[in-house]
Each structure stands twice: as structure tokens, then as C-alpha cells.
């Protein structure tokens, strides 16, 4: 089985049932709306989440269609491309035969979290692609110290920063690797100031675009500051970004990912006694260092499984690299079993929650000439309404009264308030409804865990919220405002 064949199979796994699914979270819907704004020249939210390139990349698509499914599918294909780029690099450096390269693609690509994040419309897919490029480029910089390999790695880092502010978190890891390499390349021949110039370039260029659009020149870096030091608690009451917890990710790995992850996470520890500073890191140790540093760093911050988005693939790859020491038949049997179990998890934790009722809600509202509607926190209904901004999210009971005075007739009690743990609207949940629907996605354990970064809750607390939500007979309740 070759790499390309495996990528085709992985694409089928990632896209299965996606056409019948809604955008899974608030950020995905908001990104879809912002892309359309940027496509029409409205740049007010260009630096939303510090990810200007995300909107600029998809803006041309919005000139052709605004169907959210097109954007969702394109983003899913980008995530598959990221797996392909990372697999090709590892297969080439580890000299894997074609059938093992194919198994690597499927083992990595069927990671539960990578599959889940590869079906939304957030920056995760492009972030993973840029990380795969950086991982490869920086490995070659360490192996072949030269100006061209250094600048190629910096190029991937800059591209990643344009898609995801979390690329700032790789800087300490790169510093550790530079210290280990101890070749002084960065400080010779003026490389350091050229690197600094390359990293500043997108901030100057896109910052100028922002200024021309009427935005403050400091808006993009200011987003970094606000993320690190929020000036107020969010709607769920979470105000801090530091929340040390060494068990959160380990518990997630144990309960949701394959057992082979542990082989990839712990196995390379056996190689450490042989290493000496200033010597080239073997491929397995290089990949492991990235995984260990990501785990250590993210364990200090507020948690969500996507915090280790870049590490899951590394641990699956490291597991295969160690298993390949077995006879070929045993390797194939073990890896195929792991892939099969991964697919079973995907069926249980992703496909089973995918079918959406939002289109049925939109049809009901159209039949009753409802006009704009209010919605409790979630805006998953927006892609099914025309215009899309006719769905107004609310966070406080007072907003309901204000919208009622403005002529809003209906309030959609969207169970997303449970996911985001915004309890200010909980009293409305028991109001008599004129129509109700089940929305399985709003009871998904993965969706709840992915929002624990927003809520600030720990692993057990988050799953307790999910268990409470799963007991609701309906997740979408439409009430009439009188």
C-alpha cells in the first residue's frame, strides 16, 4: 500500500458523513462569516484570533460560493494534506518501504482528535500543515547547517504565525534545539537580523493593510497580549490562561486515543542516554523532543485536546518507527489492528454525532415567516438561514428582552450553552417550546472537551457537563417570545 493510496483512503474517512454535518462550534461559524466579510472588502475582523491569512486564503472561495460545506470540505482536505506532508517526510528519512509509508498515513490520520479537528472550519488544518513543513525544514537545518536551510525553516515559522498565534509556542522549543545543536549558525554572518526581519515582515505588511482599512496598527500583536492577559473573564467565567494540570492530556490519551500512542510517547526515552550535546539528533529523538516539549508546555495552560494537535501525529509515527523492528507480518498485523480500532473510535465518537437538525429548524422558521431569531450562545443555525446574520447570539437574559422589543418573535434555546458552560441562560431552558429537535453533536464528549479551554474546567468537570447534556431528550428548543 503506497502513500498516495493511503491518502485516498484517509480522505474517504475524513469526508464520510461531512455533507450532513453542521459546523461544530461557534468559532467555525464565525470564521465562515468573517471570510465572507473579507471577500467583500470588509476587513474589520481580519485579525480575528490573530489569523489573518486564514481569511485571506478562503476569501476567493467566497466569491464563488458561500455554502459552508464547501469551506468545511476544503479545510478537511487541507488537514489530509498536512498528514501527507508529515508522513512523506518521516517515511523518507526513516526509509520506510511503500507499504509501511501507507500504514503510517492511516495510523496517523485516523487519530481521533486529528479526525475531529479535521472536520471543522478553524485554523487547525492549516496550522497542522505549517507545523509539518516547519518540522521537516528545521530537521534539515539541523542536519545541513546553512543559510538556505535556516531561512526555509524561518519561512515555515512565519507562515504558521500568519495562520495561528500558537506558533509563538514553538519558539522556546526551537531555542532548546538551537542550544543543543550548538553550531552558532543563527549568530553568524548577520543571520539573526535577517531572521528577525523575515519574522517582522508579515506584521508590517498585513498591519499596513489593516491601517488602510481603518484598523489600529497594533491590533494583531495586541491580540497576543489579550490572549495571554485577558482583561476580563469570558462568558463562562474563565479569566486565567495558566492552569497547571499534568494529568489532563494523559487522561485524554488513555480514554480516547489508541494504546500505541504510549509506545510513541515513552519509547524514545530509551535512546536518551546515548545522546551528546552538539551531535545530530536521530529522527526518533528529534520527533520525540517536539512531542515532549509540547506536552510539557501545554500542561501549564488552560486545556483542550487540540492543545496537542501537533503532537498526536508524532506519537503515532514514533510508535510505528519502533514497531518496525518486528517481523513484517507482525508489524502489519499490529498496525492494521490499531487502525481498525481507530476507525471504530471515529464511528463511535464522531460519525454517530454527525447528523444535524439545524436544516429542519431553518425550514420550520421559514414556514412560519419567523424573521431574525435569537439563539443561546450557539450560532450553528446561521449557515442555514438567509441572511446568515439573522441569527443573533445572546449571552444574558436582558438581551432577550431587548430583542423582543426590536421585533424578534422566536428564541432558539440552543444546547450549545451547555457546551460553553454559560449558565446565565439556564432558566430559559425549561420554558414551553413550540418545536424541539435532537442535535446529537451538542452531546459529543469531544466537543465538550474541546471547549474546556474556553470554560477553564478540568477533565472530569468537563465530562460531567457532557453527561448532564446527554440526558436531555432534545438539544434545540424553539420558544415564542410574547
Image (cartoon, rainbow, N blue to C red):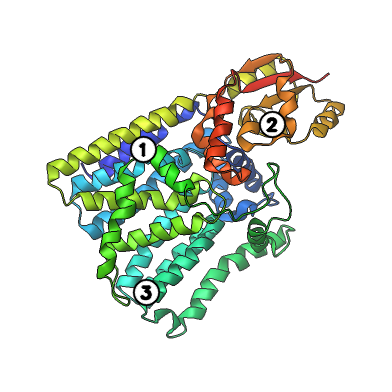
Q: Distance between the residues labelled 2 and 3?
A: 55 Å
- In the rendered structure, which disc, 1 or 3, sits on the residue that comes first in sequence? 1
Q: Residues within 10 Å of mark 3 (few under 14, many from 20)?
A: some
Q: How crowded is mark 1: few (under 14 residues within 10 Å), some or many (20 or more)?
A: some
The answer to which of 441 and 242 lies nearer the viewer is 242
Residue 175: horizontal and vertical position, in percent?
A: 45, 71
x 47%, y 84%: residue: 190
Q: How far apart are marks 1 and 3 (CA)?
A: 38 Å
* Label 1 vs label 2, nearer the camera: 1
The answer to which of 320 and 362 lies nearer the viewer is 320
x 66%, y 32%: residue: 417
* Label 1 vs label 3, nearer the camera: 3
Residue 361: horizontal and vertical position, in percent?
A: 63, 20
x 48%, y 67%: residue: 172
Mark 1–mark 3 CB contact (< 8 Å): no
- In the rendered structure, which disc, 2 or 3, sits on the residue that comes first in sequence? 3
Q: Quadrant of the C terminus?
A: top right
Badge 3 element: helix
- Residue linked to disc 2: 387
* Label 2 vs label 3, nearer the camera: 3
Residue 478: horizontal and vertical position, in percent?
A: 70, 20
Q: Residue 11 carries which label?
A: 1
Q: Distance between the residues labelled 1 and 2?
A: 32 Å
Amino acid at each position: 500500500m503506497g502513500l498516495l493510496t493511503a491518502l485516498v483512503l484517509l480522505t474517504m474517512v475524513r469526508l464520510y458523513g461531512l455533507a450532513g454535518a453542521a459546523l461544530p462550534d461557534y468559532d467555525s461559524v464565525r470564521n465562515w462569516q468573517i471570510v465572507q466579510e473579507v471577500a467583500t472588502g470588509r476587513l474589520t475582523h481580519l485579525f480575528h484570533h490573530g489569523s489573518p491569512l486564514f481569511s485571506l486564503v478562503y476569501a476567493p472561495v467566497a466569491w464563488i460560493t458561500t455554502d459552508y460545506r464547501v469551506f468545511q470540505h476544503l479545510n478537511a482536505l487541507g488537514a489530509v494534506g498536512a498528514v501527507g506532508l508529515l508522513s512523506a517526510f518521516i517515511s523518507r528519512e526513516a526509509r520506510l518501504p511503500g507499504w509501511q509509508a501507507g500504514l503510517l498515513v492511516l495510523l496517523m490520520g485516523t487519530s481521533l482528535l486529528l479526525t475531529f479537528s479535521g472536520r471543522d472550519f478553524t485554523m487547525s488544518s492549516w496550522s497542522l500543515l505549517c507545523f509539518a513543513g516547519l518540522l521537516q525544514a528545521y530537521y534539515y537545518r539541523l542536519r545541513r547547517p546553512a543559510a538556505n536551510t535556516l531561512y526555509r525553516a524561518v519561512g515555515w515559522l512565519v507562515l504558521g504565525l500568519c495562520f495561528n498565534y500558537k506558533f509563538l509556542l514553538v519558539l522556546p522549543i526551537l531555542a532548546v534545539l538551537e542550544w543543543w545543536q550548538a553550531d552558532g549558525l543563527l549568530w553568524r554572518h548577520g543571520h539573526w537580523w535577517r531572521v528577525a526581519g523575515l519574522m517582522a515582515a508579515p506584521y508590517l505588511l498585513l498591519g499596513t493593510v489593516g491601517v488602510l482599512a481603518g484598523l489600529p496598527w497594533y491590533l494583531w500583536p495586541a491580540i497576543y497580549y489579550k490572549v495571554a492577559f485577558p482583561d476580563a473573564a469570558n462568558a463562562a467565567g474563565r479569566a486565567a490562561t495558566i492552569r497547571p494540570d499534568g494529568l489532563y492530556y494523559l487522561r485524554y490519551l488513555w480514554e480516547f486515543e489508541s494504546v500505541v500512542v504510549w509506545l510513541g510517547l515513552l519509547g524514545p526515552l530509551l535512546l536518551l542516554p546515548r545522546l551528546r550535546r552538539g551531535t545530530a539528533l536521530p529522527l526518533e529523538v528529534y520527533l520525540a523532543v517536539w512531542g515532549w516539549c509540547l506536552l510539557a508546555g501545554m500542561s501549564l495552560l488552560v486545556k483542550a485536546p487540540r492543545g496537542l494537535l501537533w503532537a498526536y501525529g508524532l506519537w503515532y509515527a514514533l510508535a510505528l518507527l519502533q514497531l518496525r523492528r518486528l517481523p513484517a507480518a507482525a508489524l502489519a498485523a499490529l498496525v492494521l489492528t490499531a487502525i481498525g480500532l481507530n476507525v471504530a473510535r471515529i464511528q463511535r465518537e464522531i460519525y454517530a454525532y454527525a447528523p444535524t437538525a439545524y436544516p429542519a429548524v431553518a425550514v420550520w422558521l421559514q414556514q412560519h415567516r419567523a424573521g431574525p431569531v435569537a439563539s443561546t450562545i450557539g450560532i450553528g443555525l446561521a449557515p442555514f438561514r438567509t441572511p446568515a446574520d439573522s441569527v443573533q447570539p445572546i449571552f444574558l437574559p436582558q438581551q432577550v428582552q431587548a430583542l423582543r422589543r426590536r421585533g424578534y418573535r422566536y428564541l432558539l434555546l440552543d444546547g450549545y450553552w451547555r457546551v460553553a458552560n454559560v449558565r446565565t441562560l439556564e432558566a430559559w431552558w425549561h420554558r414551553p417550546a413550540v418545536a424541539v429537535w435532537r442535535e446529537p453533536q451538542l452531546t459529543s464528549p469531544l466537543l465538550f472537551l474541546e471547549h474546556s479551554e474556553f470554560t477553564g474546567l478540568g477533565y472530569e468537570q468537563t465530562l460531567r457537563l457532557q453527561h448532564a447534556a446527554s440526558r436531555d431528550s432534545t438539544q434545540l428548543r424553539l420558544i415564542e417570545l410574547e
